[in-house]
Amino acid sequence: YHGESSAWSNTIGTLKAGINEITIPQITALDVEQGGQLYIEYTGGQDKETYSVRVSGGNHIPTLDITRASDSNAKRALVTKYVEDLEASTAELEADHENHKKAHDGDWSAARKNCILGATDIVTRYMMYSVSSQQILAGLSGGTTEEKAEQLYQALTAADEMVNLFYQHKGLSSDPDAGVKNKLPVSRLNLRYQRMFAGAFMYAGGLHIGIEWGSVPGLTKSVPVKTTPEGKYESGQYFGWGIAHEIGHEINEGAYAIAEITNNYFSVLAQARDTNDSVRFQYPEVYKKVTSGVTGRSSNVFTQLGLYWQLHLAYDMGGYNYKTYDTYKEQFNNLFFARVDSYVRNPESAPKPGNVALSVSGDVDNKLMRLACAAAEKNILEFFERWGMVPDENTRKYAE
C-alpha cells in the first residue's frame, strides 16, 4: 500500500488444495507502515473449475466489484452497499489503526496516508482502482449515502465509457467478427495509490498506473458523456488530461508510439468537443510547422500531436468525437486508427496494392506512414513530408 514504483508487489507462491501457510515478504525498506492488499490470481482455464479461498487473518477493507451485477439497478445496489462500508470503515479508521498497529508516524495526521487499513479496491469492466478509501469518500459529495453512491456509480460508468472509446480507436472489440487478434484485453487497467519519484505527478508503470493521495478524489468526479446520435458532445466529462495521458502510455500501439506525443491522442479523445479550444495544440503553430520545410518533429509535443489529430479528422467517417459503434465492421470502417492498429496486429489483413504487402518494420516514422496509407487507402506521403518526415524506399513503394 502506497508503494514505490520500483517496489510495489511480490509474488509469494502457488496455492494448493488444503491449508497454505504463507509469509508476506518485506517489499520496501522505507520506514513506513508495511503491508497492503493480498491478491490471489486464478491462472487456470476460464469456467473450467470451481474453487474458493478462505483467508485466516488479515483485516477487512471495503471492496466493490460492479461486474458481478447484471443490470444498472443491481450495480447501484452494490455501489450503495460499498459506500455504506466506506463510511463505516473510514469513521473507525483512526481507532482501528491504533488497535491494529500503534501509529507508526507518531500521530494520525502523519500516519493516515500510510495506514494499510485505509486501502480499498474497486473493479469495473475495464478498470481497477487500488487506492485510499478515505480519499474515495472525500471525493463524494451529497448529504446522504444514496447521493454519494449515485455520484460514484456515474463516475465508474464514465470511466468505462472513456476506456471503451479508447479501445474503439485501437480497433479492439468483443464482437466475434473482430477475430482473435482484435479482441478486447482480458486484463484491467490498474490505477494504484503510489509514491511518486522525483519530478512525477503520475506515472505509467507497465502493470499499473501510479497516482498520489491528492489525485484519488478525482476518480469520483467523472460524469458520463451524453451526445447526439452522431457523437457530438452535449454534456458530461471524462477524466482530465493526466490520467488519460498515463492510460495512453499503457495502451499505445508500440509500433509507432512516441512517448509524450502519441499517448496524448487518448487525452485529446477524452476531452475534445469538436472545437479548436478543446484540444491542447494551436492550429497557427501547426501551420508554421507544416510550412517551415524543416525535417524532423516539432520541438513542441502538443504541436506534433496535431499530425495524429489531423488524420483522425480527415479519415474518421462516421461522426463526431464521441461516436462509438456497436459492430466491429462499423468501428473498422469509420475509425482511422482502428484500421491502423488492426494492421499492426495483423499486417496480412492490410491492402496489397499492386501485390505489394504492408511491412511493419523499420523506424517509427516509416511504419506510421505505411500504416496510414493502408488505412486511408491512398498515397498520403505529401502530408507526412510537410510534417518533416522522410519516407524510405519501402514506404514509397507501398504508397505508390
Image: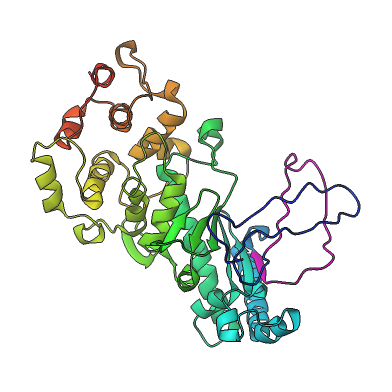
Q: Residue furthest top?
A: 355
Q: Residue 41 in magenta?
A: yes
Q: In the displayed structure, would residue 320 be above or below residue 119? A: above
Q: Quadrant of the C terminus?
A: top left
Q: Is residue 74 left or right of residue 256?
A: right
Residue drawn at point x = 44 percent, y = 20 percent: 348
Seen from the viewer's position, the closer of residues 293 and 1 is 1
Q: Is residue 54 left or right of residue 118?
A: right
Q: Nearer the viewer, residue 20 or 357?
A: 20
Asked which quadrant contains residue 186, the reply is top right
Give x and y (percent) for residue 296: 19, 37
Residue 122 in percent (x, y) is at 61, 64
- Residue that appears at 45% across and 57% down: 203
Is residue 117 rendered magenta in the image?
no
Residue 48 locus on image (x, y percent): 79, 40
Q: Main secondary structure of the magenta part?
A: loop
Identify the residue at image location x=39%, y=24%.
350
Range of magenta residues: 37-64
232 and 212: which is toward the camera? 212
The image's colour scheme reads rainbow
Please give the name of the residue rendered at 33% of the width and 64% of the height, measured from the top-left corner: 234
Q: Quadrant of the N terminus?
A: bottom right
As drawn, 93 above or below 50: below
Can residue 231 be seen by looking at this rendering?
Answer: no
In the image, residue 53 above or below residue 30: above
Examine the rendering and report whether any part of residue 304 can be seen.
Answer: yes
Residue 103 placement: quadrant:
bottom right
